[in-house]
Amino acid sequence: MSRVTAIFTATGLLGLVIAMLSALGQQPAPAVMMLGVAMVGTGFLGAVIGAVVELRHAAQTTR
């Protein structure tokens, strides 16, 4: 796993924790929940793009 993929994965997981913890409150703050959801989306996209790059690199290595 490359460093970029690991950073994006950690960002996504941290966003998931933020969104879940803010939803547990009595009156969840929409801005905090949106921040968490945005972090999850960013982490997901970054991890997928990083995985595609690593897969392409592995395919070129085997040729």
Image: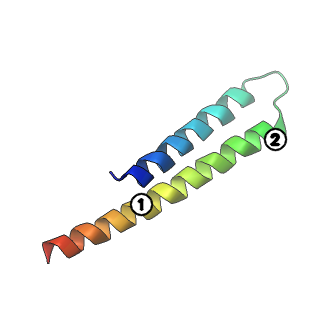
Tell me if mark 2 has few (under 14), some (14-19) or many (20+) residues whose alpha carbon lies within 10 angstroms of its own: few
Q: Left or right: where does residue 46 sit relative to residue 40?
A: left
- The x, y position of residue 18, in whole percent, is 66, 33
Label 2 close to label 1 by CB (< 8 Å): no
Residue 25 or 15: which is nearer the viewer?
Answer: 15
* Residue drawn at the location 77% of the way across and 37% of the way down: 32
Which residue is farthest front?
A: 3
- Mark 1, residue position: 50
Say which residue appears at 57% left-offset and 36% top-offset.
14
Quadrant containing the C terminus in the rendered view: bottom left
Q: Where is residue 17 in the image (x, y as percent from the top left)?
A: 60, 32
Horizontal arrangement in the rendering, residue 25 relative to residue 36 (left or right): right
Q: In which quarter of the image is residue 25?
A: top right
For image coordinates 61% across by 53% down, the residue present is 41
Q: Which amino acid does label 1 sit on?
A: Gly
Q: How many neighbours does mark 1 have within 10 angstroms: few (below 14), some (14-19), or many (20 or more)?
A: many
- Mark 2 belongs to which amino acid? Ala
Q: Is mark 2 on a helix, strand or loop?
A: helix
What residue is shown with label 2? 31
Residue at (72% x, 44% y) in the render: 35
Q: Earlier in the sequence, mark 2 or mark 1?
A: 2
